[in-house]
Image (tube, grey):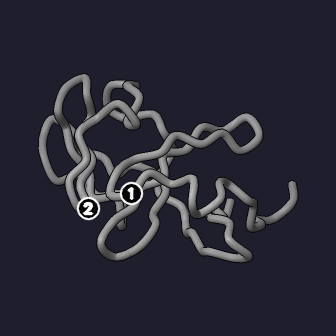
Amino acid sequence: MPGKQWRDAIAVDGVESNWVTRVAVGTRQFAIYDTPSGIHASLAVCNHGGADLCDGYFDGHVIECPLHQGAFDVRDGRPVCPPATRSMRVFETRIKDGMVQILF
């Protein structure tokens, strides 16, 4: 199995300002978050209820699942509001040549 590598996800100007943008990279679905501290990424599906996080409420650094209102900090994935109890999977991001890249 090959190691992690940087993959282009979306052009920077395609990221919705101060909100969540859904992006498919290969067979994976990601949520790209534009936050006050930069661009962050997670899997698009909530690990608690399986809902699409891109349909959730987003405020600053916190995404709220649209199904059960559990919430996560998008910077590190930690749950910040029940019923979510497990961290969501987040990915390192960078901007290169006008593209948001995700390391996976």
Which residue is rendered at x = 23% and y = 54% of the image?
A: 62
- Secondary element under disc 2, as helix, strand or loop, is loop
Amino acid at pointer 1: Ser
Residue placed farthest to the right in the image? 2
Q: Residues within 10 Å of mark 2 (few under 14, many from 20)?
A: some
- Secondary element under disc 1, as helix, strand or loop, is loop
Amino acid at pointer 2: His
Residue 27 figure quarter: top right
Q: Does residue 55 lie above or below 18 as drawn?
A: above
Residue 103 figure quarter: bottom right
Query: Horizontally, is 59 left or right of 5 in the view?
Result: left
Quadrant showing the N terminus: bottom right
Query: Horizontally, is 32 left or right of 51 in the view?
Result: right
Which residue is rendered at x = 71% and y = 44% of the image?
A: 25
* Earlier residue among tags 2 and 1: 1
Whether residue 46 is visible to the viewer of this picture, yes or no, is no
Considering depth in this image, is 88 or 16 the residue closer to the camera?
A: 16
Considering depth in this image, is 43 or 87 the residue closer to the camera?
A: 43
Which residue is rendered at x = 68% and y = 59% of the image?
A: 104
Which residue is rendered at x = 37% and y = 25% of the image?
A: 51
Q: CA distance from mark 2 to mark 1?
A: 13 Å
Label disc, if present, on residue 61 of the rendered structure: 2
Q: Position of residue 12 (x, y in %)?
A: 58, 63
Residue placed farthest to the left in the image? 82
Whether residue 42 is visible to the viewer of this picture, yes or no, is yes
Q: Position of residue 90 (x, y in %)?
A: 47, 57
Q: Which residue lies under the disc numbered 1?
A: 17
Q: Position of residue 70 (x, y in %)?
A: 19, 38
Dot in front, 2 or 1: 1
